[in-house]
Image (tube, rainbow, N blue to C red):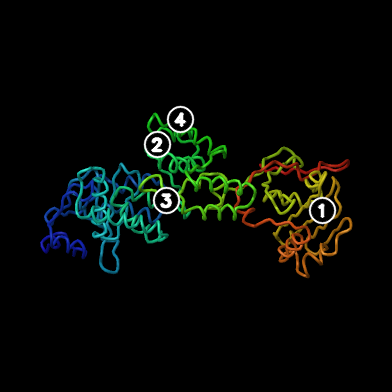
Amino acid sequence: MAAAEARLGITFPPSLRSFLAVTDGWHQAGHFVWRLAGCEDLRWCGDPHDMRGIWLDGAGDDADEDLVRLAGLWSRSLQLATESDMVDVLLDPEDVDERGEWAVYTWAPWRGSPPERLPSFRHFMEDAYREFHSMASDRPAFANETTAALDDRVEQARLAALRGAYEEARETLSDAAAFGRPGASRLRDQIDVLCGTATGAEGGASLADPYVAHEAVPLTCRAQSRYGTHQYGTDQEELLTRCYPEEDRPAVAATLRAIEEATFRYRADGAFGEAVETARALARRAQPEAAWRTLATALPAWTPRSADHIAPVGLLADPYLGPVLTPGDAWQPHPGGEPWENRTVARFGAAGDGWAFAHSGQGIDAALQERFASPATEASRGTRALTLTYAPQGDPESPAAFHFSCAENGEQRYGLTIRGETRTTTGKIPAELTSAGLLAGRTVSDGPRTALDSIAAHFGVTVSREAVCRGRLDGFETRSWLRAPAPGEGYAYWTRS
C-alpha cells in the first residue's frame, strides 16, 4: 500500500486502506464488476475515451458548473475496476467528506444515466454485496448464512405488519428487498400502497397466482390508467398486457377497461366480502365514515389470498371504496361552448332525512356572477332545494363572497348574497337565516362555517365534509349555472396571440 500511495502521490481513503489491508483486490464486486484492482493495478483513469468532451459536447453552451465538474470525473479519478461489463468504478479525490472518505462513482453506458454516487468505498462494496445477492436470488440452489438470516427477518416482518407494526416491518422488508429476497418487495409494496407512497403496480406475473389476479392486476391497471398514456406509439392496453403471459392478456385488458370506466368492483370471500358489498353501497350514498367502519369491523374475517398477502390492497382500485381508504380524484367539469352553456358535473349523495345533496368544487366563479342562474330552481319542482356557494377572497378587488337561496316548486322563495360589505336579498328570509343570523357578527371571510351550521340546523341537512372531500360519489351533469344574454346584453371574449 505504501508503494502504491507513493506511486500515485496520494494517501488512500480510510475504507479503501482497511479493505486493502485484508485483501489485495477482489473479484465479483456485485454482478457487473468482475475484478477490482489491487495495489499494483490501481491507476488514474486518465479519461481514455474522452468522456469529458462527450459530456460537454452534449451540453453545448448550456454546460453549468456542476456539469463541467462531472465531466472531469474521469480525468481526475482512480479507476478501481480492471474487468467489468463496461462499468467504470471511479474514486474521486475532489469529493471528500469530513472523515477523509472519497466518494465512489459508478457509470456504465448501457444505463443511460449519469454516474451514480456512493459516499465512500465502503458504501460501494456494501451496495455491490446487495447487488450480488439480488442478481443470484432466483437461483434455487443459491443460499448462505446471509440469505437464511434475511428470510427469517422477512417472516418476522410479515408477522409484525399483521400486528400493525408496519413502520418497523417496512424498514426490515426494504433491506431484504435490496438483497432480492423472495416476497420482501411484495410485502413492502402492500405497506407502501396503503400509506399512499406507491401505486402497488406489479406487472408481468401469472394470474394463476391469486394475489396477482385479484390484488396486483387491479392496482397495476389503476396505475397505468392514471399515469400512463401512450409511449412510442403503443396504446395503454398493449403496453400493459404485453408484460403478461399470453393466456392472461384478455383478463388484464378487461380489468384495465373496468378501471378506466369506473366499473371495477373489488371482490372478497366470506364475511369480509359481504362487508365489502355493504361498504360500497354506503360509499355510493355519501356515507364514507360508515363504509370505513363496516370494512374495519369486518377486517378480522379477512383471509389472505397467498402467504405473502397481508392486506386487501385491491380495495384501492375500487372506484367507491378506494377513496374511503385514501383521497379520491375529484370529478371534473365538462367543457362547453359558450359561457352560458358550461355544464358542471356535481357529485351527489344522501344528506339527512328526506334530503340529498349535489356538490361541485367547480363553477364557483360562475355562481357568483350577476348572470348566475341557480340549477336548484329547476330542481325544486315538487320539492324544495337550497343553493350554497362560497368563494374565499382573491385579490383586493375580489372580496370573499357567499350566496344562499331557497327554491320551492320551481320558484325561488328567498335568497341572500354577500360580497365583501355588500348584502343583497330577495324574498322574505327567516330571521335565523338573515346575514346577521347566519354569520353571527362575523365577516363572510371567517364566518362560512357558522352559516353552514345555521342552515344545517334550520333544515335538518347533514352533509359530512369527508363525504364531499374524500367520497367517491356518483355524479351527474347539471344544467348551466349562467343564463344566456338577455336582449340588449352581450358577452366579451378575450383572445391572446
Q: Position of residue 457 (x, y in %)?
A: 75, 62
Q: Is residue 255 left or right of residue 41?
A: right
Under circle 2, the secondary element is loop
Q: CA distance from mark 2 to mark 1?
A: 55 Å
Mark nearest the camera among 2 and 1 is 2
In the image: residue 287, left or right of residue 10: right
- Work out whether residue 409 or residue 496 is closer to the camera in this orientation and state it: 409
Instruction: Give residue 132's position: percent from left, percent from top.
Output: 23, 49
How far apart are the two marked residues, 1 and 4, measured between alpha carbons? 52 Å
**Crowding near the residue tagged with mark 3, few <14, some 14–19, many ≥20 C-alpha atoms within 10 Å:** many
Residue under numbered circle 2: 207
Q: Which residue is mark 3?
A: 190
Check the image and report above or below for 397 versus 107.
below
How far is mark 4 from mark 3, CA to CA? 25 Å
Q: Which image quadrant: the N terminus?
A: bottom left
Q: Residues within 10 Å of mark 1 (few under 14, many from 20)?
A: many
At label 2, which amino acid type do we have?
Leu
Q: Marks 1 and 3, Cα distance to the nearest angstrom?
A: 48 Å
Instruction: Specify which label sits upstream in the sequence, 2 or 3.
Output: 3
User: Hey, which quadrant is residue 13 in on the image?
Assistant: bottom left
Mark-to-mark CA distance, 2 and 4? 11 Å
**Tag 4 secondary structure:** helix
The answer to whether the residue labelled 2 contacts the one labelled 3, judged by CB atoms less than 8 Å apart, is no
Residue named by callout 1: 406
